Amino acid sequence: MKIAITSEGNSLNSNMDAHFGRCSYFVFYDTETGKTDFIVNPAKEVTEGAGPAAVQFIGSKKVEKVISGEFGLKIRSLLESLNIEMQREHDKTIAEIIQELKKQS
C-alpha cells in the first residue's frame, strides 16, 4: 500500500505536519517495498486552493492512505471521492509513524 504522510521536514526525524494542504513535504511510504520518498508539497505556496491541489497531487501518486493532523471538510470529501483513507495523528516523527505502519503489516 502506498501511504502519504504530511511532514515538516525531509528526514525520518522530522515531525509530522499537522496541516494537510500547506504541509512542507509529503512522505510517500510503500508498505510492500519499504521505500520512502520525501517530496516538497507543490501546493504549499499557492495563494488559494492549497488543499484541493494537494489532494490532486497525492492522488496522482496512487496513494491509498494519507496520514496528517487535520483534514478540513472539503478535503475529506475530495479524499473520500478518490477512495483515499484518512488517518489522524499528532506529535509523532515520520520514523515513529513508519514503525507503527510496519507493525500493522
Image (spheres, helix red, strand yellow):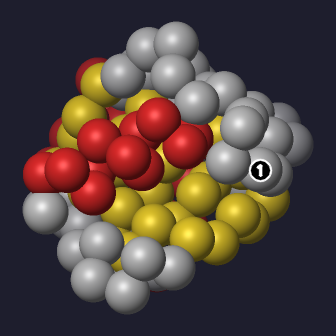
Q: Look at 58% across and 30% down and name the residue there.
A: 93
Taking the image as shown, residue 77 lies to the left or right of residue 94, namely: left
Q: Is residue 104 visible?
A: yes
Specify the amino acid type for callout 1: Ser
Frontmost residue, 2 versus 93: 93
**In the figure, residue 49 lies in which quadrant?**
top right
Left or right, 102 with respect to 92, comes to left
Where is 56 relative to 66, above or below?
below
- Left/right of residue 40 with respect to residue 53 in the rendered view: right
Query: Which quarter of the rendered picture does the C terminus lie within?
Result: bottom left
Q: Quadrant of residue 48?
A: top right
Q: Position of residue 51 (x, y in %)?
A: 54, 40
Quadrant location, the N terminus: bottom left
Q: Secondary structure at mark 1?
A: loop
Residue at image location 13% in from the left, 51% down from the top: 104
Disc 1 target residue: 11
